[in-house]
Image: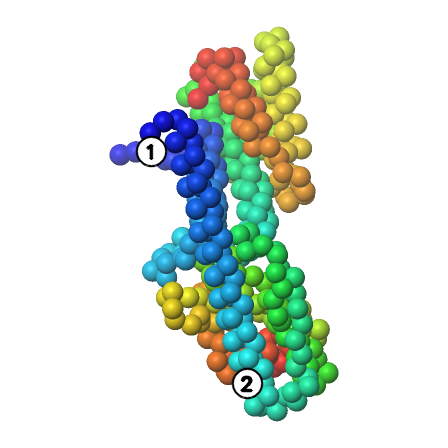
Amino acid sequence: MTNLQALVSSYQHRAEQAAQMDAVASQRKERWLAELSELNDFVRNTLISVGVPEENIQNFDVGIQEERLGRYQARGLIVRIGDAEVRFTPVGSMLIGACGRVDVSSSSGRGITVKLVADAPSQVAPWTWAAYTERGHLGGTALDEDGLAKVLETVLGHR
Amino acid sequence: MSGPLFPQLDEVELWHHSMLNGLDAMQALANVQVVIPRALEGELAAQIDEIRAFTFQEWLAWRAERVEHQEMFATIALFASFEGMLKRDFAWRATESQALHHYSFLQYLPRKADGFVPLARILACWKSIAVSLKNTQFEQVIENLERAYQDERNALAHGNNITVTPFPKIYADLVAAKLAFHSAVPDFL
């Protein structure tokens, strides 16, 4: 291979690699936003089923900037329960050892933020969400109806 | 059978760099965005778990705080190591059996009943010895140590220091002070 051929080949290879990485990042972003939408639906439907009026649950968009994924909009939820307002704010998908994170906070309570953290059991399986009131994964609670109750108890300061 | 373990200045420096290397290894983990194995156990698992689900910005802030704390702890350890060396030398030098050796402290330091002698008094004794030897260089070393323990070490140990002391400078200063002791005092431990 001549020097010129090597140079051209090297630049072509780099461009191909960059295109592949862009495609992977794009897929990751799509997956994250789809899983986020599923999470929002779960929260919305669960709360409606236990008596929260539908009009008390609103969407809001938050701008996120992440390495590889770039700048994009993600959808969060604002839920009014009684006098309190609870926000489910998407944080991102390019995280250490996790696929996605949504922080839950409230205007009332003691200012505690609960982290909803997603893991991917496999490439194809749906992400699993768990709630953490402290840093780390050691004390997480699976995000089912009971888990959601614990999340709300924590952020609302309810005993 | 090995004797008691006294951490030396070089060992403190090695420990300090090991801790920083550990953070660098975690940084590599943060960069590659890997999925953290569930099978991890023990201290490593707890450490890794603490940063799980961090964004890169959160990681940077967490790491900076850890580096700052590590600098403080390692600097305190340096001072403790040097103080231990001075006190071991004192204990040896102040005994009756060593009274005929270089610079016996018996004439300077009548020991209290509990045997405790503050570091400040030991340094004050070395300063009078340096003056009596007309060794101004050694005297300056002692004065620098007195200042370092008063201004740096005490502030760090009592939590009054809001700025991080540069570890490399304290390490270099204490290594130089140790050499100065060995140079001025032939039988320094």
Within the image, what quadrant is residue A90 found in?
bottom right
> How far across and how far down the image is residue A149, in percent?
55, 81
The type of residue carrying mark 2 is Thr
Asked whether, in this view, residue A42 is left or right of residue A121, the answer is: right
- As drawn, the label of residue A46 is 2
B105 and A11: which is toward the camera? A11
- As drawn, the label of residue B3 is 1
A44 w.r.t. A17: above or below:
below
The type of residue carrying mark 1 is Gly
B27 w.r.t. B182: above or below:
below
| Residue furthest to the top | B134
Q: Which chain letter goes with mark 1?
A: B
Task: Give me the residue at 57% from left, 67% from top.
Answer: A102
B2 w.r.t. A97: above or below:
above
> How far across and how far down the image is residue A19, in percent?
47, 50
What colouring method underlies this structural image?
Answer: rainbow
Which is closer to the viewer, label 1 or label 2? 2
Count residues near mark 2 (Cα–Cα under 10 Å), then give few for <14, some for 14-19, many for 20+: some
Secondary structure under the numbered disc 1 in the rendered image: loop
Within the image, what quadrant is residue A77 found in?
bottom right
Q: Which chain letter goes with mark 2?
A: A
